Amino acid sequence: MSAPRFSGRTVLVTGAGSGIGRAVALAFAAEGARVVAAGRRIAALEETVALAGRAGGRTVARVADVSRADETEALVRDVAEEFGSLDVAVNNAGVFRGGGPLAGMPEADWRELFDTNVTGVFLALRAQVAQMRTQPRGGAIVNVSSNLGRHKQAPDVTAYAASKAAVTSLTRGAALEHIADGVRINSVSPGPADTAMSLRPGETEAERAVRMKDQSPLGRVAATREVAEAVLYLASDAAGALVGTDLVVDGGAEL
């Protein structure tokens, strides 16, 4: 039997208290990594840790708001000091605001969206690269973007799409600038996945399933574990030649 892909490596996952972030944290733990599950809600993070523990994974929770530079820098510094290195970082923390035409969007919602989705990724990248380039074997970073933005547009999600387009651009630029430092940066762009974010207001999961049969060539939403597998691939040695790649996981919606 082959060794787990991430045995002995330290992995930081932001937004790990639910949805895709939780699935990513559990997948890394199952592959032998020491996982630091970070987010703003300790109760949700502790649930992720408990789920990983029941499966035999090694996971710890850390509370941090990625939109704050001091908390993000302290998070990365503490992870490196506690575990000796930061080998993989997954910047998944994100929020959705809007759900209507751009002209009616409150400025506060716009700012919160960009503070977390864009500034949060910038601050995380800055701290993670600073740590990883000091390490003999560097590191890998995967940003979670969206098929909305660079790949496609849809009504009533313009601001969210703009924030995710910025994440894709940040990924590509940072990848080019820091591959010489030994830091490999890529992104995953999910379409609708099995999370609360893909539900319309008042919609049930059963109603979403019916809608997706018509809206997605795949005929369904992606499972969070399927998105997690894409993240793990990009972070793995098997993807060693991928730099600035944006892996779209949307069931063919952009085709």
Image: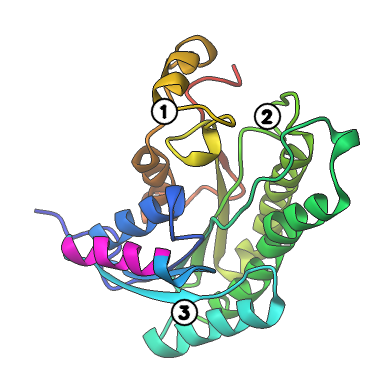
The residue carrying mark 3 is 136
Left-right relation of 219 to 252: left
Q: Local crowd at mark 2 within 10 Å, few (<14), some, or many (≥20)?
A: some
Determine the CA span between mark 1 and mark 2: 25 Å
Mark 1 or mark 3: name the one nearer the start of the chain.
3
Mark 2 or mark 3: name the one nearer the start of the chain.
3
- Pick out the residue farthest to the right: 103
Amino acid on which the number 1 mark rests in the picture: Glu
In the depicted structure, whether residue 238 falls above or below residue 205: below
Mark 1 or mark 2: name the one nearer the start of the chain.
2
Q: Is residue 213 magenta?
A: no
Q: Residue 186 in the image: state x and y as whole percent.
A: 57, 51
Q: Residue at x 78, y 34 (%)?
A: 158
84 or 22: which is nearer to us?
Answer: 22
The residue carrying mark 1 is 205
Viewer-nearest of labels 1 and 3?
1
The residue carrying mark 2 is 151
Kindly report the secondary structure that dominates the magenta region of the rendered protein: helix
Q: Which residues are magenta?
A: 44-54
Q: Residue at x 68, y 83 (%)?
A: 70
Q: Residue 91 in the image: state x and y as whole percent.
A: 55, 59
Determine the CA span between mark 1 and mark 3: 46 Å
101 or 175: which is nearer to us?
Answer: 101
Quadrant position of residue 152:
top right
Q: Is residue 53 magenta?
A: yes
- Secondary-structure class at tag 3: loop
**Residue 13 in view, yes or no:** yes
Amino acid on which the number 2 mark rests in the picture: His
Q: Local crowd at mark 3 within 10 Å, few (<14), some, or many (≥20)?
A: few
Amino acid on which the number 3 mark rests in the picture: Pro
